[in-house]
Structures are given as structure tokens and as C-alpha cells.
Image: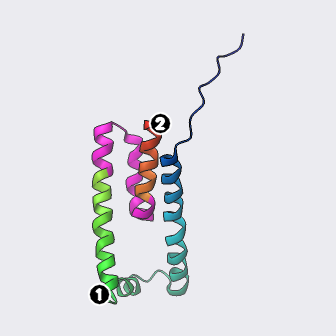
């Protein structure tokens, strides 16, 4: 007696795109941060100076904080509404690795449940 064939999952461009973006959001910034850490060590004062040295970097730093906060609120609200506590792991991942990784990874997990 053989088992019935499993339905083949169709390829999801959205899911593949989200996963690819999450990997890019992890790798590209990590290369820059890693190089800075190797050069300066874990010096919080030097990091603060680097993040606010010019009006452009201060503006970008503020933007990143706002977008990260909005992403965390979005993930928490969506996880509660969808009753998906497993996807809440994206909150600490976003805070640890950044919104460039956390948001696309959450969208990947969300799309996976939809497909």
C-alpha cells in the first residue's frame, strides 16, 4: 500500500524575494559593521560619534530608529491578529540585526503561511 502523492508546493516569487532580501539585509550591513568593529572595537562613544557626526548620518540614524520601531509594532500587532506567536521571534531578530533583516524575514514567514 503506497501513500498518496503529496501536493507539490508551487514556487512563490514573493516568498523567494523576501528571503533573498532578508539575507541581503543581514549580509551587507554586517560587512560594514564588522569592519567598523574591527577598526574601533566595541566603543559606544565612538559609535555615537559616528552615528551623529554629520547632519546626514544623524538624520539617517533617526530614520532607522523610527522605521525599526514601526516594524516592531507592525510585527507584534500582526502576530497577535494572526495568532502566530512563532513569528514573534522576528522582534528580537529585528532589534539585533536591524530592520533590513527583520522586516523581510517576517514577511517571508507570513507569506509562507499564506502559500
* In the depicted structure, whether residue 5 falls above or below residue 77: above
* In the depicted structure, whether residue 58 falls above or below residue 112: below
Q: Position of residue 110 (x, y in %)?
A: 41, 43
Quadrant assignment, res 57: bottom left
Q: Residues within 10 Å of mark 1 (few under 14, many from 20)?
A: few
Residue 27 visible within the image: yes
Q: Position of residue 16 (x, y in %)?
A: 53, 49
Q: Position of residue 52 (x, y in %)?
A: 32, 85
Q: Name the secondary structure under disc 1.
A: helix
Residue 55: image tag: 1
Query: Nearer the N terminus, badge 2 or badge 1?
Result: 1
Residue denoted by label 2: 115
Q: Nearer the viewer, residue 4 or 73?
A: 4
Report the side of 27 relative to 98 (left or right): right
Q: CA distance from mark 2 to mark 1?
A: 44 Å
Q: Residue at x 37, y 54 (%)?
A: 91
Q: Is residue 53 magenta?
A: no
Q: Residue at x 27, y 54 (%)?
A: 73
Q: Residue at x 28, y 39 (%)?
A: 81
Q: Nearer the viewer, residue 26 or 34?
A: 26
Check the image and name the residue furthest to the top: 1
Q: Residue at x 45, y 60 (%)?
A: 101
Q: Is residue 82 magenta?
A: yes
- Quadrant where the N terminus lies? top right
Q: Which residues are magenta?
A: 75-101
Amino acid at each position: 500500500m503506497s501513500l498518496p502523492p503529496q501536493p507539490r508546493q508551487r514556487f512563490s516569487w514573493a516568498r523567494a524575494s523576501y528571503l533573498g532580501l532578508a539575507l541581503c539585509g543581514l549580509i551587507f550591513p554586517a560587512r560594514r559593521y564588522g569592519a567598523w568593529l574591527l577598526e574601533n572595537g566595541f566603543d559606544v562613544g565612538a559609535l555615537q560619534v559616528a552615528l551623529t557626526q554629520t547632519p546626514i548620518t544623524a538624520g539617517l540614524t533617526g530614520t532607522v530608529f523610527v522605521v525599526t520601531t514601526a516594524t516592531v509594532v507592525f510585527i507584534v500587532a500582526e502576530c497577535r491578529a494572526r495568532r502566530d506567536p512563532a513569528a514573534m521571534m522576528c522582534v528580537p531578530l529585528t532589534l539585533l540585526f536591524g530592520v533590513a533583516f527583520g522586516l523581510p524575514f517576517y514577511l517571508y514567514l507570513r507569506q509562507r503561511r499564506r502559500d
